[in-house]
Amino acid sequence: MTAQDAAHHRPWRAIERRKSRKIRVGDVEVGGDAPITVQSMTNTLTADAGATIDQIRRLEEAGADIVRVSCPDEASTAAFSTIAKAAKVPLVADIHFHYRRAIEAAQAGAACLRINPGNIGSPDRVREVIQAARDHGCSIRIGVNAGSLERDLLEKYGEPCPDAMVESALSHARILQDHDFHEFKISVKASDVFMTVAAYQALAEAIDCPLHLGITEAGATRTGTVKSSIGLGNLLWAGIGDTIRVSLAADPVEEIKVGFDILKSLGLRHRGVNIIACPSCARQGFNVIATVEALEQRLAHISTPMSLSIIGCVVNGPGEALMTDVGFTGGGKGAGMVYLAGKPDHKMDNDRMVDHIVELVEAKAAELAAASSPKPLAAAE
């Protein structure tokens, strides 16, 4: 067990997840006792299969479990088959307005169909989509957005609100259930954090299907990260949520990074190096900010869960290092102390520390990865 794992096994950190049904998106389990999955969405033209595949590859390298691809026209669903065959993760076909695109995407290899109740059309059209999903082994996400609710619900409630969003979700869930189709999950997203959280809280009590979390149209990288962290963090802390998408007006890879950081901060899932760093002050024995920036870039390729503390002085450095796999604490006179597994191990000059820490972290990551790999069976004599 790593130092980070030990810290997250403390009882006061435990989050009891809501008990939901488990479904499959391709070969990825969602809900039940499955890990909370992280997903994003491509922003290339889907008809440009090459560009879309390239972006999916970058998302896969960042750790994406599931990727959503928009299918607004026939050219997109025509390219979907090529894209799906090249992808290493299951793809969700994002469908709006044209239910036939959902049928085409199912035929082309989509693992899940995302339909928006507010614009997919009549119950008859939904039934055709259900049949296509059943025939081709797809799951379905009912994706409710505050900005595209059905007209009758807007007339009933006067404006988008949590009750309207939940009513929309449950009415369409009943259509799927009436057709004995239960491989579905639901999202009820709004750009307003309060509305989103209230809708998910109500929905979590009303149905046992997996829930896809997100704050829709959250904003640019900084503001969107803050809004998503507050909204998703509140829900995840309460045990609500089985898969997440952080919606940022930014490179989709950033959505994956932020998603994992949110889960990591709550001890719900760990991927890559968790760098614990002080904000720096006049006591720092080295340039903490520049050092952390350099380490984040040079350690981005590591997916093995582990922890690293980078603290500028001895006030909190030794204490933080006790709980991390690798640590460095500034001590003045151009050098600092390197900690391994929480214990002081050796001193290192500041001008060599970044290269040295990268070597130590890479070695530790390789050790942890080897320890967690399945052992080959002994050859029969």
Image (spheres, grey):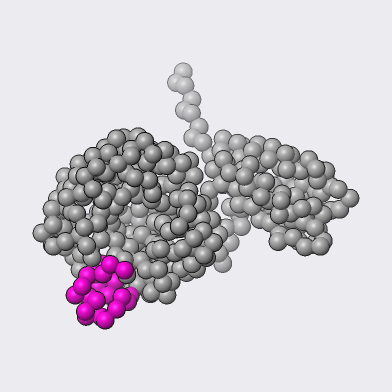
Name above or below for residue 297 compared with residue 21. Answer: above
**185 or 79, which is in the foreground?**
79
- In percent of the image, x 79 and y 52: which residue is there? 286
Q: Position of residue 252 (x, y in %)?
A: 45, 50
Classify residue 335 as left or right of residue 12. right
The magenta-colored residue range is 147-169
Position of 61 with respect to 134 (left or right) is right
State the image coordinates of residue 192 (x, y, percent, origin top left).
Answer: 41, 72
Q: Nearer the viewer, residue 148 or 263?
A: 148
Residue in view at x 24 percent, y 56 percent: 96
**Residue depicted at x 18% and y 54%:** 99
Q: Quadrant of residue 105?
A: top left
Q: Judge whether 202 appears above or below 314 on screen.
A: below
Image check: 66 left or right of 151?
right
Residue 58 visible in the shown view: yes
Q: Is residue 323 visible?
A: no
